Amino acid sequence: MQRNRRPLNPEHAQTHLPMGRLILSRMKRLFLILAALLATQILIIWMVEDLTLFESVWITMTTVTTVGYGDYAPKTMIGRISTILIMFVGAITLLTLIVSDFIEYRFYRRERIITGRWIYAMKEHIVIINTPRSGGAQYFMRFASQVRSIPGYETVPIMLLTRQFPEGLPTELSDCGVVHYHGTGSDPAALKAVHAGSARHIIVLSADESDPTSDSLTFDIAHRLAEANLGRRTTVECVSDHNRERFKALGIRTTLRPVRTYPEIMVRAVVAPGSEKVLEDLFNYERDHPHRYELALDDLTWADIVSALIRHGIGTALAYIDKDDEVICHPPTNEEVEGKGLIVLVKSAETPTVEAVEEALARYRRFLANWHEKSQASAPQAPDTGSR
């Protein structure tokens, strides 16, 4: 073994230095030296040979690229010696080194991208910190699909800050245009590497959606973001509702429970803050919940039904069930509804009975009937134009 053997490139032994920058810097130096040699060769050929400046450039370039068409060739001793020394020994060797460095840089860049250590130049992107404990790739794929379907977010870059994929992202996730950086949100250098300060939205997922103690890690990350005045761009997951006030005190824009099976809720929280509160209420009985009422619908429009339930304090109509048991959401407002049930968002503490809903609709029918009678009575009578 050769103990004192030096590496091919001495800077390779300095692992604390950014190799990509070193390779590019060396390529720039080689390019400058190559340009100087080519300029020198062009001037020598132009002065000692019976050639124009353009012909001197042509013969120099065909020589350095080893094409050698043979249409021009140096005839003087000085021209031939300069071609041997400057071109074959100097320029062609330098060109080979440049190509070698370029290939090395491409391999280096590809390896860094795969392992999540490449720093992208991003802005107005979405940063997602942490990864779901299970099904992370599927969660991110659905998130990317949902967010890209929203107007204005079709091409938004998505950056993951996680240690979950040390060997590279799954192919199906990379195909969605998602990239990642290997690190954690607790590391300021990692937050800088993903350009958190230039992000449009920052999402902090719970490290463990079933463990309330994971809120401590989330709080640490949120605190770092708040110190950088990024709280108004941040959406965090909170396992324990008791910790919500702590995040609110930091100035975090949105806090919601982890819902792994519905990343669409997270998407709505990001692009339409506040809508996640409505969606969360649909999943529990704490304040409001959707309730199904079995009753006949046959002579009211959807606008009448919605108005009747709101006026009588029942709740907000979300959909109706037609004769074929299909749930119809957002029906035409001015067409009569024919069905056998309603789905209404009601208060959980005071859920109205089906009789109360039927009474509210009946009162609204009487109100409409009286209103039509008054309208007809107040309408002006047409003048009698018959002959006497």
Image (cartoon, grey):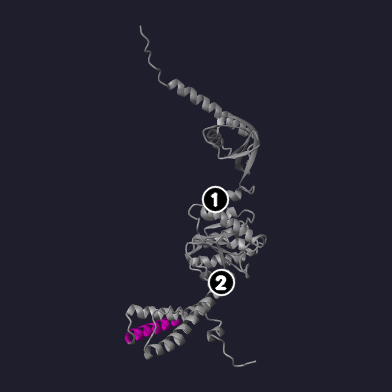
Q: Specify whether residue 111 is in view.
A: yes
Q: Residue furthest top?
A: 388
Name the residue tied to disc 2.
Answer: 110
- Span of residues in magenta: 28-47
Report the side of 282 relative to 50 (left or right). right
At horizontal 60% and vertical 61% (from top left) the residue drawn is: 173
Q: Secondary structure at mark 1?
A: helix
Report the side of 85 relative to 322 (left or right). left
Q: Position of residue 245 (x, y in %)?
A: 57, 59
For residue 329, which quarter of the picture?
A: top right
Residue toward you, 141 or 388: 141
Q: Secondary structure at mark 2?
A: helix
Report the side of 155 relative to 40 (left or right). right
In the rendered image, the vertical position of residue 183 relative to residue 233, given as above or below: below
Q: Position of residue 118 (x, y in %)?
A: 54, 71
- Of labels 1 and 2, earlier in sequence is 2
Q: Position of residue 338 (x, y in %)?
A: 60, 31
Q: Which mark is residue 275?
A: 1
Q: Position of residue 65 (x, y in %)?
A: 45, 79
In the rendered image, the vertical position of residue 177 relative to residue 300, given as above or below: below
The quadrant of the picture occupied by the C terminus is: top left
Dot 2: few (<14), some (14–19), or many (≥20) neighbours within 10 Å? some
Q: Nearer the viewer, mark 1 or mark 2?
A: 2
